Image (cartoon, rainbow, N blue to C red):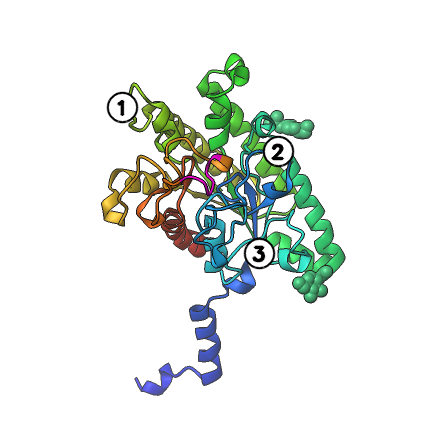
Amino acid sequence: MGNSSYRIPGPCLTILLTLVCTGTARAKVPALIVFGDSTVDTGNNNFRPTLLKSNFPPYGRDFEGGRATGRFCNGRLPPDFVSESFGLKPTVPAYLDPAYNITDFATGVTFASAGSGYDNATAMASNVIPLWKEVEMYKDYQGKLRAHFGEEKAKEIISNSLYMLSLGTNDFMLNFYVFPYRRTQFTVKQYEVFIIAAAEKFIRQLYSLGARKLSVSALPPMGCLPFERFLNINGRHDCVTLYNKVAMEFNVKMHNLMVKLNKKLTGIKILESSIYDVLYQMITKPSSFGFEVVDRACCATGTFEVSYLCNPYSPLTCSDASKFVFWDSFHPTEKTNKIMSDHIIPQLKSRFA
Ligand SMILES: *[C@@H]1O[C@H](CO)[C@@H](O)[C@H](O)[C@H]1NC(C)=O
Ligand SMILES: *[C@@H]1O[C@H](CO)[C@@H](O)[C@H](O)[C@H]1NC(C)=O
């Protein structure tokens, strides 16, 4: 057989290589559209009358320009890393931020609000944006897309974008285990079922609004948040086993829901972005990731401070956040966010890019 039979004409090869190598990610995922809590809120709470804020130093001290943006972190959050990996903006703007307009939001936007959850009562406790309101904001966004880009382009953005959902921890850690309201109605297992039902309703609503590509996060090992360890006096400030067990139980239920919805909703593709294991590894084997401190956070004493209690006046705030898994008593450092993102990005890209 002659070599010539294997020849691929030049232009064809070029097209082939363009498709294979540079990836069609840009065309395939025009925007990252985000819903959830502080893990993915890049500044919406700045514009809310709530105590859950982080738009002051030392928050953002390792962000571009050392700016406090309203991210509960010293730097960037997972949606920022995910957006960048899809060839989109390196930072995802908050929908309520007047510095941005629909042109910016057309390639990425977050409706998330720190403190929010699947349960309306969770957002109510901190006067933050409840999930149903995040959906209302998303509907408003769709209207602006149509008005600015026309029906066809708007539809293309809506159906091809990647929807990132990250919430649930606050339902348990800032609602169920803190306030008696839900505990008088539900056992924790019943509450898990209640939250799963709310998650199903929410995902079905996004689907009916046109969303097709979804990344849904499961719960982290929430018993290992520095704040929970701080309160675990009887357990020598170890991780709270019960809360980790609840997270794992919940994640199994969430997995079953995703399997069901992937079957039932025609054309939907949901990827579970599970970060439980990778975060648990960072917490139990910190040195293999280059971390030195896991049981307390960088900011202030690192035990209970979050939001206004994590402020520029504490002399105890660490100088190098990259040695810490946690930035404040509830939230990971940028380095932890990067490691978790690097864990989920290849799965997202192989599924959606
Ligand atoms: C959005 O803002 C940019 C400048 O930041 C401007 O060029 C553009 O026209 C604005 N778009 C709309 C729809 O207002
Ligand atoms: C939250 O409140 C909205 C608006 O009142 C309601 O439509 C929705 O069913 C509620 N969701 C849950 C989970 O209670």
- The residue pinned by badge 3 equals 31
User: Which one is closest to the eye, mark 2 or mark 3?
Assistant: 2
Q: Residue furthest right?
A: 147
- Residue ID at (58%, 53%): 93
Region rendered in magenta = 309-314
Q: Amino acid at mark 2?
A: Pro
Looking at the image, residue 99 sits to the left or right of residue 162; the answer is right
- The residue pinned by badge 2 equals 130
- The residue pinned by badge 1 equals 236
For the residue labelled by badge 1, is the local secondary structure a helix, a strand or a loop?
loop
Ligand 1 is found in the corner quadrant, namely: bottom right
Disc 1 vs disc 2: Cβ atoms closer than 8 Å? no
Q: Is mark 2 within 8 Å of ligand 2?
A: yes
* 104 vs 329: above or below: below
Q: Earlier in the sequence, mark 2 or mark 3?
A: 3
Instruction: Quadrant for residue 314, please give it.
Output: top left
Q: Residues within 10 Å of mark 3 (few under 14, many from 20)?
A: many
Q: x, y percentage for residue 295?
A: 31, 35
Q: x, y percentage for residue 253?
A: 44, 30
Q: Residues within 10 Å of mark 2 (few under 14, many from 20)?
A: many
Most prominent secondary structure in the magenta stretch? loop
Instruction: Quadrant for residue 227, please give it.
Output: top left
Q: Earlier in the sequence, mark 1 or mark 2?
A: 2
Label placed on residue 289: none
Q: x, y percentage for residue 86?
A: 49, 59
Instruction: Quadrant for residue 238, please give it.
Output: top left
- Residue ID at (38%, 41%): 315
Q: CA distance from mark 3 to mark 1?
A: 45 Å
Residue 149 visible in rendering: no
Looking at the image, residue 347 sits to the left or right of residue 45; the answer is left
Q: Amino acid at mark 1?
A: Arg
